[in-house]
Image (tube, rainbow, N blue to C red):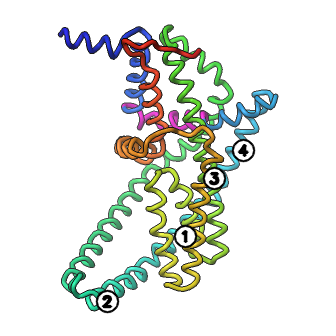
Amino acid sequence: MEIFRDWLKRVLPNAQAMSLTILLVIGFAIIVTLSDIMLPVFAAAVLAYLLEGIVAYGERKRMPRTPAVLVVYCGFLTFVTYVLIALLPLLYQQAMQLFLQLPYMINEAQKVVLQMPERYPSFITQDQIQEIIAAVRRDLLSYGQDMLSYSYTKLLGVATLIVYLILMPLLIFFFLKDKAKIMAWFGQYLPRERNLSTTVWREVDMQIGNYIRGKFFEILILGCVSYVTFSLMGLNYPALLAVANGLSVIIPYIGATLVTVPVLLVAFFQWGLSHDFYYLLLAYGVIQTLDGVLLVPLLFSEAVNLHPVAIIVAILFFGGLWGFWGVFFAIPLATLVRAVLSAWPRTGRETHLSY
């Protein structure tokens, strides 16, 4: 018991540390236990938080808050309407075209694979090729069945989706309009000794806000540039591949690699190893290089200083907990963990808090 008390004194040296611990535990418990029920509220809160940065920019330019909220909110609704009416149907159409072309691509790939034992007899045999082809077919059949069952399950939730599309815009508007009232209401239930929590929040707010807003613009710019490039070069499914390329930046180190494979496969089956294929390869390499060398430094002036190992661990951990959204918010959540560990008071060390 004495060892346990000493450990508690080191980990929770004062009331502020205890207050921050309670807030983190309660927040994590609410998200984990109520994520399915309160998903529209959580999603609306996140979107309102992202839009708040644009509203704050308007206020810094001496624009009254209410007009700033209305301008940003109308712009947000316009963007969402475009995605639902124009972009999603186009992506669906191109995805169906790609799906119909899959048998042809598989047959062409099978011809290439079947020639490998003749070219490299010491490396692979005909029996091994047949086993690989059979395994791939089984996996594709299994994936197809899973996709059909997944789509059927999602169709059952269309009514819920419609409710979300109605509730979320309303929630976002009121979160933006009545931000001060909502924050004041929450503040009356928070502990009085929360200077440490305020310090952590200020650092996290700066880092996460810059990161997520920067990621949004990176996705938008990279997707638009990719779409223009793919369309001008005549590549099949330009919108689908461009959106995938834009979304690939959500997963650092991994997303670009995963998207490169379908882009090159579509180009290969369309043109073969011709000049067009190599021009596409060059253009795609230029886009990825400009993204890393030019776009990222411009958008992320306040860089998230995390080690690559920490980023990969965060992606695996939070992605395993919350799927796509866990992957999307893996780096912000890792930033929160780092901010807490950096600001945490320790015995034997003088802690300086910025107010």
Q: Tell me the distance, in whole angstroms, between the alpha carbons under discs 2 and 3.
A: 43 Å
Q: Residues within 10 Å of mark 2 (few under 14, many from 20)?
A: few
- Residue for point 72% across, 44% down: 75
Label 3 sits on residue:
295
Residue at disc 4, secondary structure: helix
Question: Mark 4 or 2 closer to N-term?
Answer: 4
Image quadrant where residue 88 sits: bottom right
Magenta segment, prevailing SS (helix, strand or loop)? helix
Residue reaching furthest right? 62
Q: Residues within 10 Å of mark 1 (few under 14, many from 20)?
A: some
Label 2 sits on residue:
115
- Residue for point 43% across, 35% down: 37
Looking at the image, residue 35 lies above or below residue 134: above
User: Which amino acid is tagged 2?
Assistant: Gln
Query: In the rendered view, does 255 fall on the left or right side of 109?
Result: right
- Residue for point 29% across, 73% down: 136
Residue 294 at x, y percent in the picture: 64, 54
Label 1 sits on residue:
94
Label 4 sits on residue:
75
